[in-house]
Amino acid sequence: MWPEHRRERRVVAFGVYAVALLAWLSMVGGWLPMPSSGVGTTMGMTDPGVPEAMAAGAGPTGWALYLLMWGVMMVAMMYPSSAPLVSMYHRTLDGRGRGERLLRVGAFLGSYTLLWTAVGVVPLAINYAVPVSRLAASGTFLGVTLLLLAAYQLSPYKERCLDHCRTPLGFLLTHSRPGVRGAAWMGVHHGSYCLGCCWALFAFMVVVGTMNLVWMAGITLVLSVERTVSWGDRLARAVGVAAGVAGVALLVATAVGAA
């Protein structure tokens, strides 16, 4: 390995973490614009359903700003655990020119980010059918959401997607494609595995508050450990068991309270 390639690889890895940190700072600092749409003043942006309601009330501008917010949030939450794969992908390009290496890495990350940004359409669409704030106010709905999270965390499909995410070398050996277009395709393909790993956690996050920084940090920690350490599968199952217990307890408490 050439010394300049080694330095460049460190710069690439540092860049991925730096972009994630910048995304976190923008979320914590409230740098991202969100439209004002007459949502009640007693509600804050961290309350369940508020970002979705504001986006819905502001029309196309609101949708665009919501997707911007969602994309930045995905960068903050997903980039840290993707850095090892990006660094390894850069290593496979040692025989290429510097410009081509960086262009391919950029295409990989760009398509990966666009896929995750597009996922933000889902909570917006659900909010148009039934306001998320109304759903989140229901103890029964929250309990069912926890049970669905538990079922998915313990499912074979989650385990298969997690296996792909935790073995970046295996992904690169089996899904490598030539050229910039190939790099973009790889970013989408890897993103689809990541989505398979994490969609249930993000669905739960929307229910408890899309911009709730405490939940964001907790879920980021869980999905990062799940995807990067050897015992991540055990953590995934533990989260599933905990979600199942919490879901049953909440449903029982809601039923008793309504009796």
Image (spheres, rainbow, N blue to C red):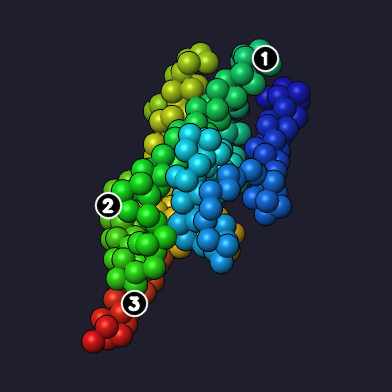
Picture coordinates of residue 176, whole percent (x, y): 44, 23
Q: Which residue carries the number 3 mark?
A: 250
Please tell me whether mark 2 or mark 3 is closer to you in this view.
Answer: 3
Which residue shows up at 46% across the image and 50% down it? 52
User: In this rendering, is residue 149 above or below 6?
Assistant: below
| Contact flag, marks 2 and 3 (Cβ < 8 Å) | no
Q: CA distance from mark 2 to mark 3?
A: 26 Å
Q: Is residue 28 visible?
A: yes
Report the side of 204 relative to 222 (left or right).
left
Residue 99: mark = 1
Q: Position of residue 220 (x, y in %)?
A: 54, 55
Q: Amino acid at mark 1?
A: Gly
What residue sits 34% from the left and 69% below the top?
Answer: 138
> Which one is in front, 6 or 213?
213
Residue 120 image offset from top left, x and y in percent: 45, 41
Q: Residue at x 51, y 13 (%)?
A: 179
Q: Earlier in the sequence, mark 1 or mark 2?
A: 1
Residue closer to the observer: 210 or 196: 210
Query: Which circle marks residue 121 in the picture?
Result: none
Left or right, 137 with respect to 251, comes to right
Report how far apart the C-alphas of labels 1 and 3 lie in the structure: 55 Å
Res 156 label: 2
150 over 66 or under it: above or below: below
Mark toward the start of the polypeptide (2 vs 3): 2
